Image (cartoon, rainbow, N blue to C red):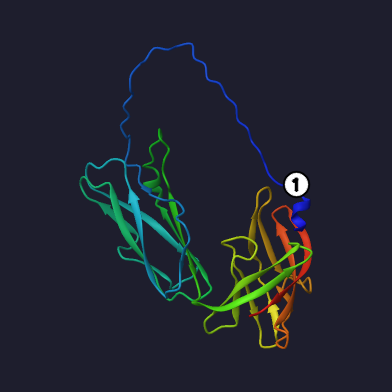
């Protein structure tokens, strides 16, 4: 493939030596928490992918000291209004002896193909309970949801990439039910499914998306680049031949590798 013409790989060797002039064993040092240290258990959980229109997500808030009761408060900020709600509002109460409180965040009215985030942030008062010695406190947590389509298999297509990938291969094609949206499964790398749409005018649009992971440059993105206008248009599908020439630009955070034309043959 074209990218192989660039330097691949990164090797890091770390050598170290530890010396000590004092060998006396001083014994274990016991540490006791100095404050409540209110914290979200996880700062950024993995993105939740669902094809359901609603779901409930448990969120755990923890504290270091369990003596006495304590009420923690937080704020909530959603990427879109009318999606998220919390069963207990924006506060939780730890009972005597309780170190963990689990609350439920409900996401409803999820639309297919959209991404949602919900950021919970501790109040300044609770942030101030941080243990200044361990400094282990998550003052916020971000819930990320990808509302996926319901996909059905169409069969095997064929993908030819003579310049960019310098190869061709059969590829599974799936369609989002009730839409003109499709995806090529594991095209360049397993786990990277390339999504595209075919409009009523047979115009093929490929939005910018991750296509595979480069060992030195990181994630490689592709997008339709037929007109160089950032519209995502990649080509025009011919129903007679079931083929679509796709002009795609390939980029990483450092810049672009250029645009190359591949050919997709639908099942």
Q: Nearer the viewer, residue 50 or 119?
A: 50
190 on left or right of 167: left
**Which quadrant would the N terminus be assigned to in this image?**
bottom right
Residue at position x 69%, y 65% in the image: 222
Locate residue 227 relative to residue 222 in the image: left or right.
Answer: right
* Image position, residue 163 (x, y; %): 79, 64
Number of numbered markers? 1
Residue assigned mark 1 = 7
In-image side of 58 versus 150 (left or right): left
Q: What residue sits 32% from the left and 38% below the top? A: 35
- Which residue is nearer to you in this view: 207 or 188? 188
| Quadrant for the C terminus in the image | bottom right
Q: Nearer the viewer, residue 93 or 136?
A: 136
Q: Position of residue 128 (x, y in %)?
A: 39, 43
Residue at the spot 77% in from the left edge and 50% down from the top edge:
6
Vertical position of residue 259 compared to residue 124: above or below: below
Residue at point 38%, 55% (across, down) = 74
Q: Residue 65: image x %, image y %?
A: 28, 40
Image location (x, y in percent) of residue 69: 23, 47
Q: Is residue 194 left or right of residue 231?
A: left
């Amino acid at each position: 493939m074209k990218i192989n013409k660039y330097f691949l790989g990164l090797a890091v060797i770390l050598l170290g030596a530890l010396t000590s002039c004092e060998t006396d064993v001083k014994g274990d040092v016991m540490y006791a928490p100095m404050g409540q240290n209110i914290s979200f258990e996880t700062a950024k959980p993995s993105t939740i992918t669902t094809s359901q229109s609603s779901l409930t997500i448990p969120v755990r808030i923890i504290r270091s000291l369990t003596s006495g009761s304590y009420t923690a408060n937080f704020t909530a900020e959603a990427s879109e209004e009318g999606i998220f709600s919390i069963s207990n509002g924006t506060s939780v109460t730890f009972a005597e002896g309780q170190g963990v409180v689990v609350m439920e965040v409900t996401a409803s009215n999820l639309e297919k193909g959209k991404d949602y985030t919900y950021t919970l942030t501790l109040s300044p008062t609770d942030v101030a309970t941080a243990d200044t010695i361990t400094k282990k406190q998550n003052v916020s947590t971000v819930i990320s949801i990808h509302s996926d389509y319901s996909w059905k298999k169409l069969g095997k297509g064929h993908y030819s990439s003579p310049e960019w990938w310098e190869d061709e291969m059969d590829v599974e094609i799936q369609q989002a039910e009730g839409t003109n949206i499709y995806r090529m499964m594991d095209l360049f790398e397993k786990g990277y499914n390339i999504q595209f749409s075919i409009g009523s005018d047979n115009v093929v649009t490929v939005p910018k998306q991750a296509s595979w992971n480069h060992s030195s440059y990181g994630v490689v993105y592709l997008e339709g680049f037929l007109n160089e206008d950032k519209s995502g248009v990649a080509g025009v599908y011919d129903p007679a031949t079931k083929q679509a020439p796709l002009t795609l630009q390939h980029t990483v955070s450092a810049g672009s590798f250029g645009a190359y034309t591949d050919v997709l043959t639908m099942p």
